[in-house]
């Protein structure tokens, strides 16, 4: 019996050919034509004027924090149900998260966000303060969890009321776009002030490790490229005008990225098909919102016995994972404010993510479904 992994890369396209080409050209580092090509093709796909390719989604998020002007002693509203890399960049810039609950989409609950801002915060000389903590709120990080789409219409409207920048962590949502409402046709990650994507090995497309930074203002994308190359202002004389980072994507990674992007829509169709197949086999998965064409990145099964099911799947050589431990319960974030966290706790205790790779075969889906049904008595 073979293993069935949770989410692995699908490298069946031009990956080898483009990476070999980059090697033959001897452009393997942070210069080379694949970087520009990947940025341009990604920007076209996401329908934005420009994008900056970086080393990871985390690096992209770190740059969004700096670009938003968030700094020491500030507060940033962020979800508790997410991967820790969505939150750590808040700390990298010396700020502190205020944790928000999710709704049924697993993404930020706009109703609670609005109530927190209305009841728990006040404007002082044009700046919004958390009344209890006495610190200014400088931004909102929204995560499009598992490729679903957060309710951006409500969140952007609330943020606009208080003039707060919105940072979209679309690391898991490459390819998700809105099909209804004010943002119809817009890609997740391109609605707020800044957006970040990830091409880590488990994502829907991968560059081994890598990320992309996008922004409403094209000037900020130019700034991100500058900051990701040590803020070098002169090619020859080692002149630098800011404290920058070594965050630029390499040409080798970008060569992979170009090949993966060519296949993205195909991967999404396969993921949608396998998701439907699980459902037809009576495996009830959490739905994706009907106002988005989701990329169907991760499939979440709601089990009454999360740990028992995961153990059983493991014994049957099927890789499964719980949802992340809620961030406000992690030791380094325990002291931070967490506002009315309820729904996220229910999801944390029950979700099991089951195999969803774009190279998952029909018979794999059937085997996973049979094992789950046997365990759950369906
Ligand atoms: C929600 C979320 N944010 C941030 C990241 C960080 O991306 P990366 O691994 O590319 O740094 C990831 C994925 O790894 C993620 O799932």
Image (cartoon, rainbow, N blue to C red):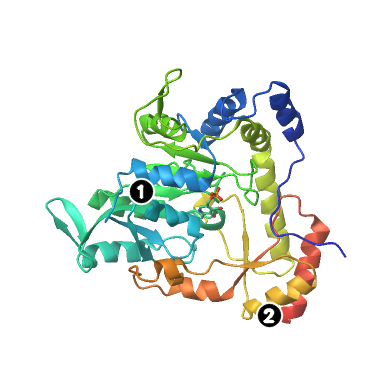
Residue at 45%, 19% (x, y): give it.
235
Q: Is residue 253 above or below residue 337?
A: above
Q: Residues within 10 Å of mark 1 (few under 14, many from 20)?
A: many
Label tally: 2
Q: Quadrant of the image for the N terminus? A: bottom right
* Disc 1 CB within 8 Å of nearest ligand 1 atom: no
Dot 2 or dot 1: first in sequence order is 1
Asked if one can make out residue 183 in the rendered structure from this viewpoint, the answer is no
Q: Nearer the viewer, residue 221 or 107?
A: 221
Q: Which residue is labeled 2 in the image?
A: 308
Q: Is residue 89 visible?
A: yes
User: Which residue is at 24% across, 51% downward?
Assistant: 161
- Element type at marker 1? strand
Task: Give the number of the disc on residue 244.
Answer: none
Q: Position of residue 44 (x, y in %)?
A: 53, 30
Q: Nearer the viewer, residue 344 or 181?
A: 344
Against 35, residue 107 (above or below) is: below
The response on whether ligand 1 sits within 8 Å of label 2 is no
Q: Which residue is mark 1?
A: 166
Q: Residue 232: horizontal and vertical position, in percent? A: 42, 26
Please tell me how crowded label 2 is: few (under 14), some (14-19), or many (20+) other residues with Cα within 10 Å: few
Is residue 173 or residue 247 the one in the foreground?
247
Which image quarter: residue 35?
top right
> Quick one: which residue is furthest to the right in this view?
1
Foreground residue, 218 or 26?
A: 26
| Rendered location of residue 114, percent (x, y) | 29, 62
* Residues at circles 2 and 1 in contact by the CB criterion of under 8 Å: no
SS at mark 2 in the image:
helix
The quadrant of the picture occupied by the C terminus is bottom right
Q: Is residue 177 above or below residue 360?
A: above
């Amino acid at each position: 019996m073979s293993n069935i992994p949770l989410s692995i890369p699908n490298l069946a396209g031009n990956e080898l050919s483009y990476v070999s080409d980059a090697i033959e050209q001897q452009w393997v580092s942070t210069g080379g034509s694949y970087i520009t090509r990947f940025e341009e093709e990604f920007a076209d796909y996401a329908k934005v004027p420009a994008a900056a390719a970086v080393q990871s989604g985390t690096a992209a998020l770190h740059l969004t924090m700096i670009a938003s002007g968030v700094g020491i002693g500030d507060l940033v509203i962020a979800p508790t149900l997410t991967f820790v890399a969505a939150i750590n960049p808040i700390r990298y810039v010396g700020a502190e998260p205020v944790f928000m609950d999710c709704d049924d989409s697993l993404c930020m609950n706009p109703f609670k966000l609005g109530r927190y801002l209305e009841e728990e915060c006040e404007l002082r000389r044009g700046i919004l303060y958390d009344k209890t903590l006495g610190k200014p709120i400088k931004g909102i990080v929204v995560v499009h969890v598992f490729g679903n789409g957060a309710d951006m219409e409500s969140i952007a409207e609330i943020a606009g009321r208080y003039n707060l920048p919105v940072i979209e962590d679309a690391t898991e949502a490459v390819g998700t776009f809105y099909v209804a409402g004010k943002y119809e046709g817009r890609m997740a990650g391109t609605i707020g002030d800044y957006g970040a994507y990830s091409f880590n090995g488990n994502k829907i497309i991968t560059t081994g490790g890598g990320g992309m930074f996008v922004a409403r203002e094209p000037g900020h994308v130019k700034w991100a490229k500058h900051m990701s190359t040590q803020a070098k202002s002169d090619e020859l004389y080692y002149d630098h005008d800011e404290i920058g980072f070594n965050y630029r994507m390499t040409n080798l990674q970008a060569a992979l990225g170009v090949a993966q992007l060519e296949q993205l829509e195909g991967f999404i169709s396969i993921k949608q098909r396998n998701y439907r197949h699980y459902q037809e086999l009576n495996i009830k998965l959490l739905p994706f919102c009907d106002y988005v064409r989701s990329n169907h990145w991760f499939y979440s099964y709601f089990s009454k016995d999360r740990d028992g099911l995961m153990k059983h799947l493991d014994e049957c050589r099927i890789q499964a994972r719980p949802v992340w431990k809620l961030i406000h319960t992690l030791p380094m974030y325990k002291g931070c404010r967490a506002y009315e966290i309820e729904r996220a706790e229910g999801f944390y205790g029950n979700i099991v993510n089951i195999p969803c790779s774009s190279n998952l075969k029909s018979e794999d889906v059937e085997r996973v479904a049979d094992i789950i049904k046997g365990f759950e008595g369906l």
